[in-house]
Amino acid sequence: MPVNILGISAYYHDSAAALVRDGMVLAAAQQERFSRKKHDAAFPSDAVRYCLDEAGIALAELDQVVFYDKPLVKFERLLETYLAYAPRGLRSFITAMPVWLKEKLFLKDLLKRELAALGDCTREQLPPLLFTEHHQAHAASAFFPSPFEHAAVLCLDGVGEWATTTVWLGESNRLTPQWEIRFPHSLGLLYSAFTYFAGFKVNSGEYKLMGLAPYGQPRYADLIRDHLIDIKDDGSFRMDMRYFNYANGLTMTNRRFARLFGGPPRKPESPVTQREMDLAASVQVVTEEVVLRLADTLHRELKTDQLCLAGGVALNCVANGRLQREGPFAAIWIQPAAGDAGGALGAALAVWHQYLDQPRGTDRRDVADTGAVQDRMQGAYLGPRFSNAEIEAFLRDCDAPYERLDDDVLMPRLAALLADGKILGWFQGRMEFGPRALGGRSIIGDPRNPTMQSVMNLKIKYRESFRPFAPAVLAEKVGEWFEHDSESPYMLMVAPVTADKRITMSETEQALFGIDKLKIARSQVPAVTHVDYSARIQTVQRETNPRFHQLIEAFAARTGVPLLVNTSFNVRGEPIVGSPADAYRCFMRTEMDYLVLENCLLAKSQQPAPARDDAWQQEFELD
């Protein structure tokens, strides 16, 4: 009989569920895609229900359920932290305790109650419930699906129970802990502190800070090193907590931090100034320095040429790109759902390989075009899918005009529309697991178009104009356009555009500061070239997403450019669309020109005119 293990992450942010059968990942999804609440922290009922449906089993038929951290150990950390800072943390203590005393301290009971209700069974009928440590789940999510049999594993996040940085050695089906750095000293929380100070939302706006960094100068980097974080030669670090509030207060930083940087935090939604750009550039430089030093230490201590990464800091693709180009490791693999959502998958894999002592799977295979060994994430396409029949039934129900076209007609037609400057919603195959849209639920456009970035940001996504877009490039062509010679299937690596594709700037253009830099086209593909000539690359493989690969091939045949702009199919503050209804709603609310739902093509000009009402823009909380 096959062994089915359900992993769950919840009650902090990015709740998710993942189902593993005999070590193979069958399904994984975040709750936000179903509830339509970004970073939803609630028990992931809908995601669990989807995983069970995909596996074709009832909840009571599961062999194990596992939760991704240990609440009692986390409570111990909270108590010890409050005692260490008493009486300064009293207000924070009083705010946090009711939730802990009502729910989190009795998490096992709460989980059993939710599971029994979802499975329509008694608690006695539930499968055994296990708990992993938070960083153990991260490490398992990084190593077990990776293509490596032997690797160093580095996990960096805000905080789990106590750990903020952990190092592991992965060998076959074993993960051996090596050493750790504990709360309150946290690279993730340092980055989040600057995210907060720059006026963005913590646990959501960190990627905005990363995108803002190239507009600034790292003029505060020495100030950060001298006052906020003591970085040792081996990459370990210790923070001066006199500047931070997160251990004992309700904010990330305090007045001493503000005095150090010459003023109070930026108010959310107020104009972004050169100071925020310089702060972003500065903390980015310091973060990269820590990551590179840690990597050198791991390489020296563990004597392996492969590295796996997970934890929220592993989503910093600029640091990842430098690690790939300048670090000591020959190969790097990063869990695409590197944040807490991936903890659900890691917990399930930890039970299979470590608790049940089962060997690694044999489902990895060679990728024909690159010769590389594919991982076990199936391109991260682990979510729900919808057939053409289901989509057509939906479109008929809402009287939406469409054409159904076979791929050999559809792909050249879409390539022509894209080359003509049209912006398409692209919905096909299984939904992605993790924060990135990878050609399953994407908005796509022509990267050669110099106005594409501003149009997409302001008229489609309704988000800040400085935010860059990523290229989805044919895996076999990536080296022709970017200084990058390996795979980046999960959009987790940043690399420079090759010199021959760049446009030389005049002295006047080079002297521009801040957002003014955005107005200058820097390459033959300006819509995906950041102001420092970098790009956040997604390599698209025929094996894992054949239809998206086919579309880019059709665009390349027409234009000579083997890449497209790829951004997530949503508006600001909205989770990525999950269903055809979500996609159609988003399409009709924005200025996208066409929508592709599997083989159904919809033109905006042919759709019934929607009621003129912009109130929906209040539906999603700004990120």
Image (cartoon, rainbow, N blue to C red):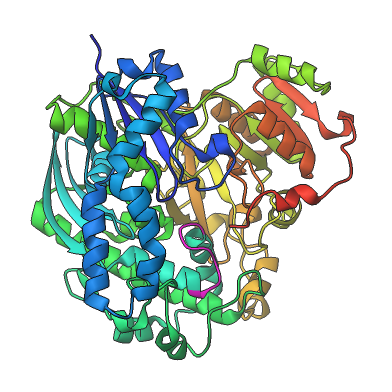
Q: Magenta segment, which residues?
A: 197-204
In the image, residue 140 sits, relative to residue 168, either above or below, namely above
Q: Is residue 605 left or right of residue 391?
A: right
Can the viewer see residue 603 in this picture? yes
Q: At x 46% / y 24%, what residue is drawn?
A: 49
Q: At x 59% / y 30%, what residue is drawn?
A: 553
Q: Is residue 303 left or right of residue 27?
A: left
Identify the image quadrant of residue 609. Answer: top right
Q: At x 54% / y 75%, what residue is drawn?
A: 277
| Front one among 460 and 121 | 121
In the image, residue 102 sits, relative to residue 464, either above or below, namely above
| Front one among 525 and 193 | 193
Identify the image quadrant of residue 248. Answer: bottom left
The mark tally for this picture is: 0
**How far from the left and from the top, in percent, is residue 273?**
61, 79
**How far from the left and from the top, in percent, is residue 538?**
49, 43
**How far from the left and from the top, in percent, is residue 2?**
25, 13
Identify the image quadrant of residue 530. Answer: bottom right
Image quadrant occupied by the N terminus: top left
Image quadrant occupied by the C terminus: bottom right
| Front one among 106 and 206 | 106
**How far from the left and from the top, in percent, is residue 94?**
38, 68
Can the viewer see residue 409 in this picture? no
Per the picture, the main secondary structure of the magenta-coloured stretch is: loop
Q: At x 49% / y 48%, what residue is drawn?
A: 537
